[in-house]
Structure formats: structure tokens, C-alpha cells
Image (tube, rainbow, N blue to C red):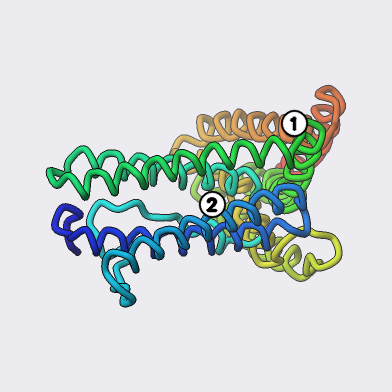
Amino acid sequence: MRNFDELSEREILALAIGSEEEDGRIYADFAEGLRGDYPASARIFVEMAAEEGEHRRRLIDLYREKFGEHIPLIRRQDVRGFVTRKPVWQLQPLRLDAVRGQAELMELETARFYRRAAGRSTDASIRKLLGDLAEAEEAHEHTAERLREENLPEEVLHQEDEAARRMFVLRVIQPGLAGLMDGSVSTLAPVFAAAFATGRSWDAFLVGMAASIGAGISMGFAEALSDNGSLTGRGAPWIRGGICGVMTTLGGIGHTLPFLIPGFLTATIIAMIVVIAELAVISWIRWKYMDTSPLSAAMQVGFGGALVFATGILIGSS
């Protein structure tokens, strides 16, 4: 990689041309990825891509005027310290908040980079060029704000934010909550049955680990194979299945780990406290994301957990 201050004026201009082209393609990818779920935001990125194309055209005209037709290939990754772009556009489905945040950072970071580079430059022509590029990026930032105001009035913005929240609930919260509930509740019976049947912490730990991991694998595959997401909009099945499987395993391991404590009574008491904490977290998630009243969520989850817990103790003590 080369240092920025080693580049000639010709190379700096070529770098700016390539950067504007890349940013325009990123905005176009944003627009395409958001078109189905967030058409108003997609229109913003279509216009921003057009703005980048205009910047690129002006830079090319200036380059031809000063240096001729051949533009050397210099990319961001070839220059040390240049702004890099996180490939948010490759993560499907696109998250609206991530896309908006990335777009704002793209303009701010590029303008900041040009300003800092201009401040370090001792060559008057390079300083002027970098200053002009910084002004262009700042103008583009204002253009983005204007486009957002024109295309995203408060009502539409609220609708898109609400749609993003629904997508997050469908694709992350629901499979995660299903796994956490299954792992936290269904493993109570085998763990505490083994604990009270044997009176040994290690045996309860082994049973709990086996039940947690097995339930995680089972729930993960069941979630992944239940719906490919094409009609329901619930996203990629294997991502959903992975979330469900991991949360199932974590839900079971939570009250299994205390049985690593050799003292049976101490381990059992701590495990019970962990169970209460797990059920409280599940109730909070149901209230926060599933529009369930706090009292109703607590009663439903607590009643189910108490039944399974009692079943394990009864079977283990018989």
C-alpha cells in the first residue's frame, strides 16, 4: 500500500474518480435492496447514485483536460489510510437503519478524509484539488438531507421505521424467542429430574448439556425447514434456524452451568435463581416486541415454567 502523500495530483484525481464510481454503485445496490420493502428510501439512493455519477463525470472532464485519456487504476484499498466501506450492501435482507447510517458515514468520512489530506499537503494545486473534493462531498451530504426531506416525510419515515421493526421481529426476535423459550423451559424437567434423582451436580450438568445441545440442534433444523421465507418475509431460513438453535442452547445451558458447582444444594439454589432470571427475560421480550402486557407475559411464561419445573422435581424425587 502507498501513502496518500506519495500520490501525484494525477493519481489523486484518478483515485477520486474510482471512489465516486464505487460509491455510486453502492448507492445503486442500496436502492435495489430496499426497493421491495422501503420504496421511499430506495428513491433516495437512486438519486444519490445519480449525484455520484455527476461528480464522477465532472472529475473525468477535469482529468482529461489536465492529463489526457488514460486514467490509472488506483483503488481505496491501494492507499494507506483511505476510507474503507463496510459491505453492508451484501447482507441480505438489508436493514434500513444500517443502510441509512452507512450512507451518512460515507459522505462524512470521505469529506473528512479530503479535508485532512488537504491540510497535510504542501503543494498548492493538490491542496486546492482536495479542498474542492471536500466541498463536493459536503454538498452531496446536503443533497442527501434534501432528498431525505423530499422523499421521506414524517409519516413515511414512521411507516418505514415501523416496517423495519416488524421485519426485525419476524426475522430475529420470533425465532430467537421461540428458541429461548424452548431451551429455558423444556430442559427444566430433565435437568432437575436428574439432579433430584441422583443428588449429584455432575450428573445434572451432563444431562443438562445433552438436553440443551440436542434441543438446539433440533429446534434449529425445525425452524430452518419450516419456512423458506419467500412468502412470509421471515428471511433466510438457515439464518433463522441458526438464531433459533443458538438461543435454544443458551436457554438450556443457563440453568445447567450452576451444576458445575460441586455442592449439590448450592448448585440447585443458584440454578433455580437462574431459571427465574431466564423466565423474567423471556417475559420482558414478549412485552417489548410481541405486544403482550407485562402481567400477561409474566403469568404465561411463569405458569409454563412452573409446570415443567414441578414435573422434573416430581419425576426426579419418585
Q: Earlier in the sequence, mark 2 or mark 1?
A: 2
Q: Quadrant of the C terminus?
A: top right
- Residue under the image location 44 percent in, 44 percent down: 137
10 to the left or right of 158 = left
- Residue under the image location 24 percent in, 64 percent down: 11
Under mark 2, the amino acid is Asp
Residue 23 percent location from the top left of the image: 48, 58
Under mark 1, the amino acid is Lys
- Furthest-bottom residue in this view: 70
Residue in the foreground of this view, choosing between 106 and 310: 106
Residue 310 visible in the displayed image: no
Tell me the mark number nearer the camera, choosing from 2 and 1.
Answer: 1
Residue 238 visible in the displayed image: yes
Q: Is residue 155 above or below residue 229?
A: above
Residue, disc 2: 203
Residue 158 percent location from the top left of the image: 78, 34
Check disc 1: other Cα within 10 Å, few if <14, some if 14-19, many if 20+.
few
Check disc 2 and report its element: helix, strand or loop: helix
Residue in the foreground of this view, choosing between 81 and 229: 81
Q: Is residue 296 above or below residue 111?
A: above
191 to the left or right of 84 = right
Residue in the foreground of this view, choosing between 124 and 122: 124
Residue, disc 1: 288
